[in-house]
Image (cartoon, rainbow, N blue to C red):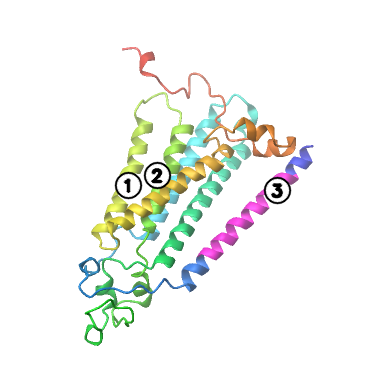
Amino acid sequence: MALRLRKTKLMMFAVDLSIVIVAGVALLLVHVLVKPFDRGFFCDDETIQHPYREDTVPMPLCAAIGVAVAVSSFFVIECSLSLGCKKTRDRRPIHVLWTIAKLMAIFCFGVGSTLILTETGKLCLGRLRPNFLTVCKPNISAINCTRFVEYFTCTNTELSEKIILDSRKSFPSGHSSFVAFTAIFLGVYYEKRLKLEFSVFLKTFLQIILAVLALFTMFSRVSDYKHHWSDVLGGAFLGVATGVWTVCCLGCHIGLRAMSSAHQTHMSPVLDTQHLPLSDPCTPEPATFLSPNFDKIDV
């Protein structure tokens, strides 16, 4: 039975890893090879005449900080939880590492899903950024500005072709969708997995920090003239929706939500063992990881 379970685990891991790899490669190819929809403009449209500015929060930095915060949170919280476990099995390093690996895998899957949906919107809509005319510099003298301009050529030689092409990919905001997903996922993770006895407000404070960082990133996209406010709002909605969807659909595998009784009833014994939330919070030692209540605090 144990050997069968181990083989099933390996097969599930191989299938899921293959899906993540294929999705990642597909996203990379689409981002590099597929061009956005050629959307025209009106010459007197003031919403796309803003100056070009460098990013306050570059996407590589945004992604690095988000992933670093997520990974460090997983390691610190899961290792702390394992120290309070009564079961010897839950204290083993291999069990803790397996739990962290599942958290990272589901987090990366959610991020990838968010980016795929975001890139799909960018390519299909081709909305022009607020700095489009500055970045593109179309030859106005050769354009009939009395009507909607559909056919034009960008003449800006000071900026790279990548930046000029990217000026057609305004909606939805990729920064906003990423930080919104990360804030939702980690916020729920802190709520369900972070057990503290020495502070009432620390968990909420950490969640507020996530929200502040996410909002700062979103607002910077508007002040940098990289997105319209509606782009940021759309990206934020997409990130929140994907975060909620990830927690609802996959959270039972990592202890972020309880598995429904119907789900457990209709599964075979082998699959049931595989899909049980192995990383559910183990029973903590009473004096170590109990969350405090105001009514139990001696004044």
Task: State the image coordinates of residue 281 (x, y, percent, origin top left).
Answer: 55, 30
Q: Amino acid type of disc 1?
A: Leu
Q: Which residue corresponds to mark 1? A: 213
Give the residue drawn at x 43%, y 62%.
121
Segment tinted magenta in the rendering: 7-27
Q: What is the C-alpha distance between the residues marked 1 and 3?
A: 38 Å
Mark 1 / mark 2, whichever is N-terminal: 2
Q: Amino acid type of disc 3?
A: Leu
Queried whether the magenta region covers residue 242, the answer comes back as no
Furthest-top residue in this view: 298
Task: State the image coordinates of residue 298 (x, y, percent, origin top left).
Answer: 34, 12
Q: Which residue corresponds to mark 2? A: 183
Q: Please state, as top left, top right, bottom left or bottom right, where the C terminus lies in the image.
A: top left
Indicate which label's residue lies in the foreground, 2 or 3.
Answer: 2
Queried whether the magenta region covers residue 17, the answer comes back as yes
Task: State the image coordinates of residue 51 (x, y, percent, origin top left).
Answer: 21, 69
Contact, CB < 8 Å: mark 1 with mark 3?
Answer: no
Contact, CB < 8 Å: mark 1 with mark 2?
Answer: yes
Of the numbered discs in the image, which one, if any, rests on residue 10?
Answer: 3
